[in-house]
Amino acid sequence: MNWLIAILQSALFIILAPLLAGWLKYCKCRLQNRKAPSLLQPYQDLLKLSNKQPVVSEQASWLFITAPYLIFSATALAASVVPLIVVDLPTSASADVIVMVGFFAFARFFLTLAGLDIGTAFGGMGSSREMTISSLAEPAMLMAIFTLTMTASTTNLSGAIAHVLDEGLVLRPSFVFALFALVLVAIAETGRIPVDNPTTHLELTMIHEAMILEYSGRYLALIEWASQLKLMLYGVLIANIFFPWGIAETFALKDLGYGLLAILGKLALLAIFLAIAETLVAKMRLFRVQEYLSFAYLLGLIGMLSHIILEASR
Amino acid sequence: MNIGQTDFYTQAILSLAALVGLTSFLMLGQSRLLRLIFVFALQGFLLTLTTSLAAYSLGNPHLYISAALTLLLKVIFIPWMLRREVLQMNIHRDIQTLKNKTMIMLGGASLMVFSYYVLHPIVQNTAPVMLNALAVSLSVVLLGMLLMISHRQAVAHVVGFMSIENGLFFAAIVATKGMPMVVELGIAFDVLVAAVLFGIFFLHIRSSIDSLDVDLLNRLNEIEK
Amino acid sequence: MILFSAYLAVLLSFASGLLALTVNQRHLLQTLCNYSFSTLFKNQSQHKAWIDKNLELQRFPAFLRQGVFILLGLSGLFAVIAGLTVLISKQVITDQLPLGLPWLPWHIRFDCLSGFFFLIIGIGVFAVSLYGPGYVRTYKEHQHPFASLGLFTGLFVAGMLLVLLSDDAFMFMIAWELMSVASYFLVAFQHENSANRRAAFLYLLMAEVGALAIILAFGVLASFSDGFTFNALRESKLSVTWSSIAFVLALLGFGMKAGIAPIHVWLPEAHPVAPSHISALMSGVMLKVAVYGLIRFCFDLLSEVQWQWGVVLLILGSLSALAGILYAMMQPNLKRLLAYSSVENIGIIFMVLGLTMIFMATGHPQLGVLGLLAALFHAFNHALFKNLLFLGAGILQHQTHELNIDMMGGLIKKMPQTSLLFLVGCMSISSLPLFNGFVSEWLAFQTALQVDVLDNGVLRSLIPVAAAALALTAALAAACFVKVFGLIFLGQPRSHHSEKAHEVQNKFMLAGPALLAGLCFFIGIFPSTIIHLINNTSEQLLGQTLPNVNALSWLWLAPVSAQQASYSPPLVLIAALIAAGICYSYFRRNPLTTVRTAPTWDCGFGGLTPRMQYTSSSFTMPFRRIFAKVWIVDEQISKETKGAMNQEVASVHYQLQVHDHSWPHIYTPIAQGVNDLARQVGRIQTGNIRTYLGYSFVTLILLLWLIS
Amino acid sequence: MIAAYFVLLIPFAGIIFFAIADSRSDMGRINVYFNAVCLLATLWLAVNVVNHGTILSANKAYIVDPFNVYLIVLTAFVGLTTSIFSAPYMAHENEIGKLTAGRLKLYYTMYQGFMLAMYLVLTTNNLGIMWVAMEGATLATVLLVSLYRTPESIEAAWKYFILCGVGIAQALFGTILLYYAAMQIGDGSNALLWSVLYENATKLNPEILEIAFVFMLIGYGTKIGLVPLHNWLPDAHSEGPTPMSAVLSGLLLNDALYAVVRNKMLVDGTTHSNIAGYLMMGFGLLSFLVGALFLHRQKDIKRLFSYSSIEHMGMMTFAFGIGGSLATYAALLHMTVHSLTKSAIFVTVGHAAQIAGTQRIEKIRGLIRTQPQVGWGLLIGTLAIAGFPPFGVFTSEFLVLLATMHSYPWLAPLVLLGIGIAFAGLFRHIQPIVYGEKPEGQLPVKANLWPVIIHLGLVLWLGLSIPGFLAHWFSQATVLISGSTPL
């Protein structure tokens, strides 16, 4: 039964991801008072791309072809680990939060390799920058998550979220720091402004785009979808870890419905915040990113220490 | 105790000891090779006297033999050989000026005191003559070394070497009334061979650096240029 | 029986060494076999014919090479058998050999810990022996005699096995040094170029110093007990001070061998210059022997561990993990890079061992077991994938005559199998899920996350930082090996050689790496197989087992408790396959959308040439900017201008060198100091005989004065 | 006991033979025969001693106990193997015109003379005779050092002669003092006999003995090559013919040390302050460290190894000084393995010098490519002398380290430092010599490497396992010196 729920939930996750992207674009357009495309635009793009005939460079090797599938499935697995509408998932038992980070690493590994495969300067540039940023972001993220896992004394995500739920509303300084750290990391990892600009095609500012320049057709679709999935995943993480209220604890339909509504609401809110941030902030130079990320890392560290010293000290 | 109460033998030994020590001092201060050799021969002769005296008074005959050996080697053969060398090398006229001679003499004197000081603890249970004799011989040994350190002439080195031997020999005679016969003979043999070798070496050194100044023998060093 | 196979492993490695010696004694062998066939067994003429055929002049060398490596492989096989059997049967077998000092015969002890490392060595040696014959074929006999190579390889393996078997300080040291010296000769094997000689000298020097430190460490124990047997040393009652001294000495000695920063410098020099299969053994296996030594010394011989030691290990480990991977990232030479990444992995192992010590000393033995589990498991994994990568590097060198990864590229099309194997290696070493590297990293994190049980505030805040350092290390490792794989196998060929390169003919050269790659994947999916073995080890060594043994099944990995953390690689694999399958089939549904190939788009810029690709140094440029303080970077750009007023630039020359901080700060001063001291001492040899006489005179006076 | 007389008579006959027989081509082989016969005699002697314990000749002139009997056998053995090596070596020197036939004759005569002196030092029961023999050894070898008649060789010989002569004179003074002390307890005629002295050791006057020991230490220490009395040693080793260096390093130093240890045993028996031990430890450690440092800046390969000899003698002296069964055992073992290894090394060094035509280190290159046996011999020999297992030197150094750790832990770091420095000093020179491409015009020479193989084989054997009878000797000797068995 709960396996079924788990699978359904991950499917839901995957399906909702483009919607979030659409909503985000919509908010941004409204904030920049432009006329917004429909919320379903991302779906149409994906469909279009998946029906086009892909064109692949002669230089490409088998790795270039297979990478999108691997990237997508790795991200999907990561998604399946995160409780969206209900806690107590068997999937999050079979792969805990560290494994989730591992999935991200997996996807990134192949994305960067694909960037290097054709042998263009752009690809190399993108891979190099992506690797730099992520390798700084990963420890910061782990710090933030460790704060949670040490509070809940489990690395099992649904377990941890359940633990936060049971505690009820406890104001934890560590969580505040961890929240900020996670937000910063999420922005960096999902390639949003101010770290990267998803809509740019200026070679000097590109990071994520530079790696996937050579992709087209269904491969591009997969990668885009994967990145949308990643965005949503971070959103859900932030939402459900720090504001878990509303998530279903039983498999009763009513609870599930409430859970769905709750998460949709939270995500919508988050997206609005993100849109506002992206409109206000300008993209920063590449070599400012390290300061940005080390700040995130610092926050995570402070969060963990404050957990250890203030909250759990004996 | 003062010297008046001792028997004649002791007095004689002591005075000879004093003379031997004196000769060592003379050698140390000596800057002319021929005189050096002469004083060395003199020391050998004193040694011979001491030996025969000991042989007579202690009445053990084998000391006579070593006395004879000493006479042959130290008084006749070696001085003759050295003298020949010096004359052949024609260096008997030039004087090696010793740097800070007074310091050396003072050092010699202090060495004598030092050897008394060193040997003092060992003679509680024996006659003080032993102390004097041993101290003198030790100081002769040390003075011999000092001689070799202060003189640059190979000949002087040989003399110093031999005078060290003299000191040892004197100690052997006075303190222990001579070593066992085999040892005496062995030592004498060694001295003989050594003397011969010295002769040979003078030849070689002359042929290699045509001088007998040992300071010129410094090819084998490890000082970083 | 178990001990017998262990001995057999040692003897076989010796035998392979001795057999290699006969490379120049063909006629001797001929006469020998003629004689034996004429006298002992007359009837087997077909064997005789076979042997005679192989002893012919042109066939003999190949035949001999085969023979030597077959013996080596058998030795590896028996080592594996011995290790597995002892691990499963949880026995402790002791024995004595009539060698050594008259009052101290060689004591032998074969227990689970030794067995586990036997397993590691056996696998490594076996893979190498598959790989070897094809690799060494290219050496010219008169230049690089196979005799010495084979002989010292055999001795090297034998030395490592004996270290594991030894149960008294004396035999331990002999075996240890045998290992060092044999590998020294292997490092100096291609001694015609001076870099190798320098590396070999450095290696031997540091090995010697380390060995002396170990001897002293044993000496400390021995002076508080009677005799040098490990049993006696276990009994020794030391004060905390003395045991700490012993620990520091042991750490110095074993750490030097294991290549812990900052005493790692021999490693990146020595590993690259040895023949590749030897580098594989040195980096993959020998370092583990050093780890074994440290574990044996600290957890077995020393009566109880102190948590301060754990802190020392933790800090040193984190430092060398970070430094190792950062330096690795900057290396253009593939084998140097791999060597530095060995430093990183050893750092991780030491770090987790530090955690183990802390937990043991603060009275949480079960968590200590968890740490030991992570450490040993990571040692095992590192042996697998580092061997794999070094063998792969050997193949690349063999085919492209290049080790500089800036000169390679595009090899994925030229050498498909190699590239696949290498990819597996890269994925495991950058600890991606589904591969073995990830599991041990996961365990390490799990261990670090148990910090809550500790009371000491320092530790409680230190360990999470270490965990974050571990995370950073992992991420950097991923970046580094993306660079490696991407630049070597992807993109377009950057040099003539790599353009002409092709897959190796000799399939055995692929079989060795393939075996290791398979193991990497298998262990990644079913880690419990190894974890059970390690559990037995820790049960024997620490008298403790994992908190939650019964949760260990082939499917689930939940070392502490299913509530706290669990990981099920098989399920993940299945899920991944399903997901990939679904989207694959979904997108392949439409026959119109078959892939069309076209020239590279590249944003519409044309004229793409291989020289436009990112190189190693450009790929790592951001890191160089960010972690600038870590290296001594000397970067020079020289511009040649021409034309009127030197306006236009004729050519730009860029060169980059990245140096190790430890040289100018530690090693050069020491060498300088010794030289100066030697020069000072040389002054006493003035060459003037009177001075010499003065010496003895003064000495005499002084002594006499001293006496009275 | 006849065996002892044989041991002494054979080299004497050798002297006579070479002295009177006119110089001939096969003198080398005859020399080998003499030494071989002598080795047999010593083995016979050894068997006697092992079976019946200490032997004292009827006239008390000779004493052979477990301590010196194995040194005697060692002396004979090294003498034999070195003579095997020296036959082709000297022949080669003769061919290339460095030596005339007359000198060759002198060489062989003095070789036998040296052996005789060595045996005499070891077997005699009389301190006086021991002194005489020791001086005789100097006199016998001094002409060999200057055999080539080059200015350097003459200078070296002169220094050797003067320094050792003066030094040994101190030993004689010590002997006289000892005799004097012995005469206090009467019985003048044989008061210099070890056997007698050991019996009445407790009755002797301790002050006199301490002073006497100082003189002995200075005297024989000069011959051991203890810093700062060592200055003659590198010169004499580097300038004389290589076989001479081999026997000097392998035998003369050992026997001088033997004399010192004998005296130490006596002093320990008399005084209860461990003054002798401390003195020996001090000198030993000093020589060990200084010798190790000297290795670094050498330019002449034979000097290099003579300094390594100083360093190792220092270590032995140090170990004997520590006293105690373990250290003593280690020192005895180290004596054996050092003289075996060092003479083997000098054999290879000699050939290496002949291959390159010079002893200058920077001229000798790529030996392994030029003449593999010599190259590998030198390399492995150096490994062995640097104390790498499984060679015997490691065993003894291991024991010394542990003994130091046990008795004087604060000295252990110094010893460790010394070993490390010495190792680096040796290898920084040896590695470029043996490795690398072969330079032009380096040709292999006719070499007989059996001595090297045998010696290194033995050292290897000693490292892996000390054979029973040898262990028996060692432990007997250890009991004799330190009064207790090792562990």
Image (spheres, coloured by chain):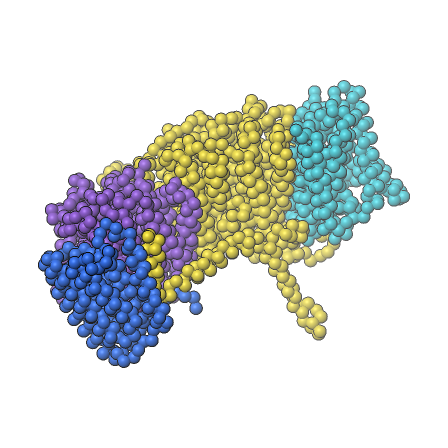
Shown in blue, the chain is B
Q: Residue at x 81, y 27 (%)?
A: A261
Q: Quadrant of the C terminus of chain B?
A: bottom left
Shown in purple, the chain is D
C557 over D389 or under it: above or below: above
In this picture, residue C288 sits left or right of residue D49: right
Shown in cyan, the chain is A
Q: Between D221 and C210, which is closer to the camera in this rendering?
A: D221
User: Residue C225 falls in which quadrant of the image?
Assistant: top left
Q: Between C116 and B150, which is closer to the camera in this rendering?
A: B150
In this picture, residue C691 sits left or right of residue C608: left
Where does residue D398 sit, x and y in percent of width and height?
37, 44
Q: Residue at x 51, y 39 (%)?
A: C383
Q: Is residue B166 shown to the viewer in this render?
A: no
Where does residue C6 sit, x and y in percent of width and height?
39, 34
Q: Between D314 and C375, which is closer to the camera in this rendering?
A: D314
Color of chain C here? yellow
Q: Residue at x 64, y 62 (%)?
A: C637
In this picture, residue C107 sits left or right of residue A110: left
Q: Quadrant of the N terminus of chain B?
A: bottom left
Q: Is residue A21 shown to the viewer in this render?
A: yes
D275 over C104 or under it: above or below: below
User: Residue A135 falls in which quadrant of the image?
Assistant: top right
Q: Residue at x 70, y 32 (%)?
A: A310
Where does residue B135 sit, x and y in percent of width and height?
26, 59
Where does residue D69 sit, x and y in percent of width and height?
21, 47
In this picture, residue A6 sits left or right of residue D301: right
| Outermost residue to the top | A252
